[in-house]
Amino acid sequence: MTRDFVGYGAEPPHAGWPGNARIAVNFVINFEEGSELSYPAGDGVSETGLTEMIGSDLGVRGRDLGAESMFEYGARVGFWRFHRIFTRFRLPVTIFGCARAFEANPPAAAAIAATDWDICSHGYRWTNHPGLAEDEERRQITAAVDLIRQTTGKSPAGWYCRYAPSENTRRLLVEHGGFLYDSDTYNDELPYWVRVGDKAHLVVPYSLTTNDSKFGRGVFGSGEDFFAFLRDSFDLLYDEGADRPRMMSVGLHMRLTGHPGRAQALIRFIEHILAHSHVWVCRREDIARHWIARFPPPQ
């Protein structure tokens, strides 16, 4: 994988979003709970990533029942709060879904199946891909797609690893076939094409900046922090979008923003963007299909 420090440069292409929108906003719900490393799953470790106690050593050795219960909250409560919010505002959502998480929560999987929300595979489980043997990563990609189809009836349109891909991931995705895009990068505010072997492959960048993961890392304190940062990010992109329309990804976790004080900030942000005209709130699949139609893969 080569590095590109130039990208679109000073003159990015005009995205031409539907309705002459200045900005495409994509809400992403990370559906991970039930797929994380845990003792019940036989991993011999308890996952604590993006929980309320990040950075605290409470002396827990062995199985961490507190961390497990925080993941359970996301599935039991947080998902349904998100479902009510986005259903109330009639807004589309992209699910970054781990296959085993769907399997662990059939009612939520059925609710997602009943919506027009699209799914981007977030892996077979919520685990790291760097360091995986190539054959194992290939197996997990296939297993993820198969299980997502089995549990939701939907085929994932894209792929996003936990945090980062391996050096083999993109090639294995193209080899597997069936993906419109991957989001395994954070380097732009517009989609772009790359070459993988002799094939063109679309990348729709994601963001860990406009992302509630900062609650789990101690950066955001209150819901007001989250709202203000999202609002300011949107406002600048909206202003720039008069000439240079971009996209904005808003990353949400059910065990983080699924809590009331943070969910209220999400509602305030939704109300803020809906007070503007020329905003395209869309699914990630919609962005990919629009880009493919407007900017076909280079020969």
Image (cartoon, grey):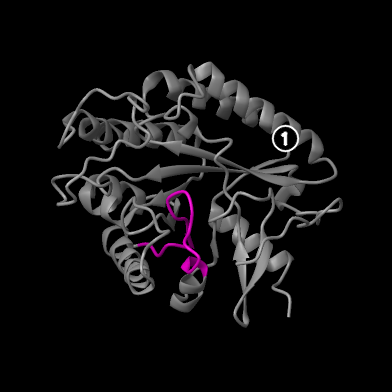
Image quarter where the N terminus lies is: bottom right
Residue 180 placement: quadrant: bottom right
Residue 254 placement: quadrant: top left
Task: Say if residue 178 shows up in the picture.
Answer: no
| Position in image of residue 34 (x %, y %) | 24, 45
Compared across the picture, whether 130 is left or right of 236 comes to: left
- Residue 212 falls inside the magenta stretch: no
Amino acid identity at mark 1: Ser
- In depth, the one of 260 and 124 nearer the eye is 124
Please report the residue visible at 73 percent of the width from the left and 66 percent of the height from the top.
295
- In depth, the one of 184 and 61 nearer the eye is 61
Task: Say if residue 38 shows up in the picture.
Answer: yes
What range is drawn magenta here? 154-170
| Numbered disc 1: secondary structure | loop
Height in image: 117 above or below 292?
A: above
| Position in image of residue 212 (x %, y %) | 48, 32
Compared across the picture, whether 48 is left or right of 221 comes to: left
Residue designated by label 1: 277
Please report the residue visible at 47 percent of the width from the left and 56 percent of the height from the top.
160
Predominant SS of the magenta segment: loop
